[in-house]
């Protein structure tokens, strides 16, 4: 399974370093079988060796250039980073990234062979407008995206579940993931208020291949406990 932590705008460089030392030790001491990813802030990127994959939460579709506040592949190459999150709900809704821009980012990083965790998810009003409209909305977030890309991982994260403590029912997660499975073969992660208390229920669900965890992963012991739960699933 894939167990991923998205730090968002949390933890300093030093805190991230300590977190990763602890996490690497846990992963090797316990012979963890899961694929573990961490997405720290851009300022916490550093040389890293070990079993944990480090990715970036965002990068501009460029090698370098005049893009104030952004980073490109020159900065990623410095630390041998080959994994990027694209289409996260906060990039779409808070930072106002359009589907067109997301497509250009996706194509840029796909052409370079990066592992892409591509996020989709519906806002509350869309979910409340019924299943057909919700699935149409999710489909619209996949327009222009090569869903057959070999290095793709998809994360389904309902916007209303992110950082709210709310989650869809297990049946609803299975319903969406099963529908997504028909359109793509990539591993499917669930994200949105995954915590130590609910991860054991979510991970074994049909067509769930892992989780993308935000606030619930900020404490390294909690994240390790989730990884351990995944390791204990038959
Ligand atoms: P959350 O965030 O776990 O804090 O809800 C998940 C995410 O945005 O990836």
Image (cartoon, grey):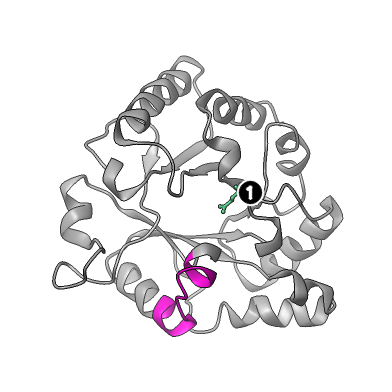
Q: Is residue 21 above or below residue 39?
A: above
Rendered residue at 70%/56% (across/down): 161
The residue carrying mark 1 has its beta carbon less than 8 Å from ligand 1:
no
Q: Which residue is mark 1?
A: 209
Q: How many numbered discs sit on the rendered protein?
A: 1
> Where residue 170 appears, x then y in whole percent?
83, 51
Please give the name of the residue rendered at 52% of the width and 63% of the height, measured from the top-left corner. 90
Q: Residue at x 16, y 48 (%)?
A: 78
Q: Quadrant of the C terminus?
A: top right
For residue 93, side relative to residue 49 (left or right) = right
Q: Is residue 194 magenta?
A: no
Q: Residue at x 18, y 54 (%)?
A: 75
Up/down of 59 relative to 25, above or below: below
SS for callout 1: loop
Q: Which residues are magenta?
A: 91-103
Instruction: Answer left or right for 199 relative to 14.
Output: right
Q: Give the overall secondary structure of the magenta segment.
A: helix
**Nearest to the observer: residue 6 or residue 154:** 6
Q: Quadrant of the N terminus?
A: top right
In this view, the residue in front, 103 or 2, is: 103
Percent coordinates x, y for residue 6 in the rendering: 49, 46
- Can residue 1 be seen here? The reply is no
Residue 46 point in image, percent of width and height: 23, 38
In this view, 155 is above or below 133: above
**Residue 221 can be seen in this image:** yes
| Quarter holding residue 107 | bottom left
Quadrant of the image occupied by residue 136: bottom right
Q: Is residue 99 magenta?
A: yes
Q: Residues within 10 Å of mark 1 (few under 14, many from 20)?
A: many
């Amino acid at each position: 399974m894939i167990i991923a932590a998205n730090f968002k705008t949390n933890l300093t460089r030093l805190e991230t370093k300590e977190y990763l030392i602890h996490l690497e030790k846990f992963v090797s001491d316990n012979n963890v079988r899961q694929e573990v990813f961490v997405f720290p802030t851009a300022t916490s990127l550093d040389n890293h060796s070990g079993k944990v994959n480090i990715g970036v939460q965002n990068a501009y579709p460029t090698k370098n250039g005049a893009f104030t506040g952004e980073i490109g592949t020159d900065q990623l190459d410095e630390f041998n980073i080959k994994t990027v999150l694209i289409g996260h709900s906060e990039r779409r809704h808070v930072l106002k990234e359009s589907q067109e821009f997301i497509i250009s980012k996706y194509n840029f990083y796909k052409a370079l062979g990066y592992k892409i965790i591509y996020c989709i998810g519906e806002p509350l009003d869309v979910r409340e407008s019924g299943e057909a409209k919700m699935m149409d909305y999710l489909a619209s977030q996949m327009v222009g995206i090569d869903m057959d890309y070999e290095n793709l991982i998809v994360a389904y994260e309902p916007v209303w579940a992110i950082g709210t403590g709310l989650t869809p029912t297990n049946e609803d997660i299975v319903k969406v993931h099963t529908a997504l499975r028909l359109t793509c073969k990539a591993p499917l992660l669930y994200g949105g208020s995954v915590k130590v208390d609910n991860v054991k229920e979510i991970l074994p669900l049909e067509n769930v291949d892992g989780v993308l965890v935000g606030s619930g992963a900020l404490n390294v012991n909690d994240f390790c406990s989730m990884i351990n739960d995944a390791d204990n699933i038959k």
